[in-house]
Image (tube, rainbow, N blue to C red):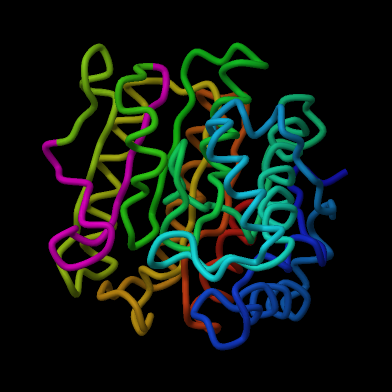
Amino acid sequence: MSEAAVYAGKKLADYHFGPDHPFGPYRYSAFMERFHQNGLDQQVAHEGAYLANDDDMLLFHTPEFLAEIKRRSVEGTEHYGSDTPMFIGAYDVASTVVGTVIRAVDDLMDRRYRRAFVPIGGLHHGGRGSAAGFCLLNDCGVAIEVLKQRYGMQRVAYIDIDAHHGDGVFYAFEFDPGVIIADIHEDGRSLYPGTGDAEETGRGKAIGTKLNLPMKRGANDTEFMAAWDKVELFLLRLEPEFIIMQSGADCLAGDPLTHLKFTEEAHRHATTRLRIIADECSHGRLLVTGGGGYDADNIAAAWGAVVEALV
């Protein structure tokens, strides 16, 4: 049986904001086309999409926020805040992203697989009580809480290579020394959400368990690799028991919303190296989600490279 699984399905594909929005249905299609064309579908196990329940959500999100999202999901209110569209049924669709990521966590903890990829995941801007940046809920935040509260994990690592700083995850756990965060992103002075300064290393007892590595506009693979070396040393020092990586593809050259110039080799290298670290520290447990990315070719290249490295 394969040691790696890819989680996909129509319900997961439904998390988008329409064909005219940057976070459109083409994103899932671009990955799946590459997945089948390259024969990657023959090298991994296939899992479907799963719906999370309220008990799952409440591990991370506030009850007041969930009630508000449910209400707006019924009404189809146009936006939550200034940048996150709402639509009828949005809560169930977003809950499917969360539920699928939770199922991947459960499967890795049950040793069904060692490695997993969920393409429509990594909604890293959602806060405990807010939606933002195209992220209605925060699947990675919920997954971290599942690992801590249900599985008793003491050291969970969250790695983020999306062009945008993963603020929803970072600030939810900035006081938590048991959540190890390393985030390589475009400098907040030139890109939303404007956060993730290098000086932010955690707060209180968590100081030293967070690593922000902002990159200047136009940074390329060479600069990514130099930053990645710091991530590796950081992780090996803190020895995580479980590793999650958000692998947004918007850091590749040509993305219409960002200004970095990485290639898919950044994703391949990060995944390959995390696989080695997971084998050393985390019993092989490595969960990778998708994330941002608003160019179809870049999505196919980046996430195809991720799966190739997971196989």
Given residues 227 and 208, the one toward you in this image is 208
Residue drawn at x 57%, y 59% as measured from the top left: 306
In the displayed structure, would residue 97 be above or below residue 206? below
Residue drawn at x 25%, y 12% as measured from the top left: 205
Question: Residue 194 falls in which quadrant of the image?
Answer: bottom left
Question: Residue 215 falls in which quadrant of the image?
Answer: bottom left
In the displayed structure, would residue 154 be above or below residue 140? above
Given residues 170 and 198, the one toward you in this image is 170
Given residues 115 and 91, the one toward you in this image is 91
Q: Which residues are magenta?
A: 178-199
Question: Residue 186 falls in which quadrant of the image?
Answer: bottom left
Residue drawn at x 72%, y 40% as measured from the top left: 104
Picture coordinates of residue 37 (x, y %)? 75, 81
| Image quarter hosting the N terminus | top right
Is 246 inside the magenta-drawn segment?
no
Picture coordinates of residue 246 (x, y %)? 49, 50
Q: Residue furthest right?
A: 1
Given residues 239 and 143, the one toward you in this image is 143
Q: Is residue 104 left or right of residue 289?
A: right
Is 196 inside the magenta-drawn segment?
yes
Picture coordinates of residue 69 (x, y %)? 60, 49
| Tally of marks | 0
Picture coordinates of residue 245 (x, y %)? 49, 45
Q: Main secondary structure of the magenta part?
A: loop
